[in-house]
Image (cartoon, rainbow, N blue to C red):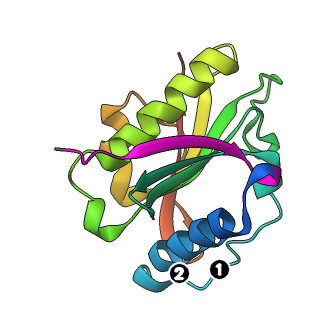
Amino acid sequence: MSPNIQWQWIQFDQMTPQQMEAMYCLRQAVFIIEQDCIYPDIDGKDYQAIHLFGWLDEQLVATLRVFESYQEYQSDSGETRASIGRICTHKDFRNNGTGQKSVDKALDFIKRNYNNKPVKIGAQFYLKQFYEKLGFKQVSDIYDEDGIDHIHMLLKN
């Protein structure tokens, strides 16, 4: 069962220094340290996104970012697509519904605020079934990103 997490949407330029530090610390702990993957997490795109924070007391336990239109994921026909990225859950809060709750909140946000646009993600391949349960379909071959197998997945609402 998911703990009593307090969810907060926030624009990058409205983050306090403490919120920003908590976000980068959690992403670093998961994506760089746990996954032993040296990559540039600070990619110059956070300011374009709205961020979801999941707080338990004063600890950030989940975060992700949502883009209304992510240029790299537009269709060949020019259809704009929203995107969810940097989906991250603290290791002590996995397998209890926290990750799914954060993605559900992002999909609901897109539905309500971005006219239910299709959503494309770059998912780590080992999480394929997790995203399929949420309605995503694999739309690419496996590709290597920073030494980790990834796939593109699409959710058409």
Q: In the image, residue 21 lies at what x, y percent?
A: 64, 72
Disc 1 crowd rating (10 Å Cα; few below 14, some 14-19, many 20+) is few
Q: Kindly tell me whether residue 155 is visible in this rendering.
A: no
Left or right: where 29 falls relative to 12: left
Asked whether 64 falls inside the magenta stretch, the response is: no
Which numbered disc covers residue 32?
2
Image marks 1 and 2: residues in contact by CB distance under 8 Å: yes
Vertical order, 18 against 81 (above or below): below
Disc 2 crowd rating (10 Å Cα; few below 14, some 14-19, many 20+) is some
Determine which quarter of the picture holds residue 15: bottom right
- Amino acid at pointer 2: Ile
Extreme-left residue of the structure: 1
Q: Give the residue drawn at x 65%, y 69%.
A: 18
Vertical order, 122 against 67 (above or below): below
Q: Secondary structure at mark 2?
A: helix
Magenta highlight range? 1-13
Vertical order, 16 against 135 (above or below): below
Q: In the image, residue 142 lies at what x, y percent?
A: 49, 57
